[in-house]
Amino acid sequence: MSRLRVYDQRDPSQPLATQSEHAAIAQALAKVGVRFERWAANQPIAPGASQEAVIAAYHDDIERLKRERGYQAVDVISLTADHPQKDALRQKFLSEHTHSEDEVRFFVAGEGQFSLHIGERIYDVLCEAGDLIGVPDGTRHWFDMGPNPHFVAIRLFTNPEGWVAQFTGADIAERFPRLEN
């Protein structure tokens, strides 16, 4: 189940608010400029499906976003607990960073946790299969795939180079709850 926890940036011990109803999560995130949607596949996705099959299943939604936001590139990322670089990848994404373009992820399978540092708040968003999150460019955030990652996500980019991060050097991500799957 998708979840939103909102924290004061100074206190990771207790959320100020917790939400698990999708429409309420979307509404709360929209107030801070973050897109959060629920998508449905147009055709079934089998485990181990190719990138082409995954993109084809969500073709209409992908094309809608490309028209709306000018995305140029689409790919699929898939990580599992047996990935040889899972620990290094987790550590890389756990550092607070920004992007010069929106970070858009649609979770086809599994889960991942985006933590968004907006103003004085941390918006901790657990995304699961069917969730799309659009983090606006320049938003400080980090991503946790957990110690045993299992997710498949479609990524959309305006920059054909793909994922390019500018790390803030802040240690704030180390103080907040992580995804323990």
Image: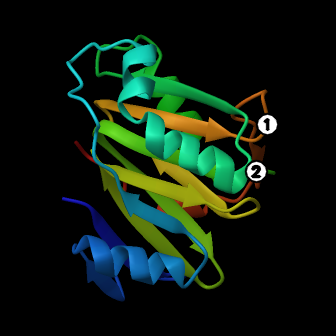
Q: Secondary structure at mark 2?
A: loop
Q: Which mark is residue 20?
A: none
Labels 1 & 2 near each other (Cβ < 8 A): yes
Q: CA distance from mark 1 to mark 2?
A: 7 Å
Residue 166: horizontal and vertical position, in percent?
79, 46
Q: Residue at x 22, y 42 (%)?
A: 181
The residue nearer to you, when weighing 70 against 105, is: 70
Residue 151: horizontal and vertical position, in percent?
33, 32
The residue nearer to you, when weighing 76 against 98, is: 76
Residue 23: horizontal and vertical position, in percent?
30, 76
Q: Is residue 165 visible?
A: yes
Residue 69: horizontal and vertical position, in percent?
70, 54
Q: Neighbour class for label 1 at 10 Å: few (<14), some, many (≥20)?
A: some
The residue nearer to you, when weighing 88 against 58, is: 58
125 lies left or right of 44 = right
Q: Which mark is residue 101?
A: 2
87 lies left or right of 172 = left
Q: Amino acid at mark 2?
A: Glu
Q: Secondary structure at mark 1?
A: loop
Instruction: Answer with the quarter of the image where residue 155 lies.
Output: top right
Q: Residue at x 20, y 28 (%)?
A: 44
Q: Looking at the rendering, in which quadrant would you find the N terminus?
A: bottom left
Q: Amino acid at mark 1?
A: Asn
- The residue labelled by disc 1 is 159
- Lower sequence index among marks 1 and 2: 2
The answer to whether residue 174 is above or below residue 129 is below
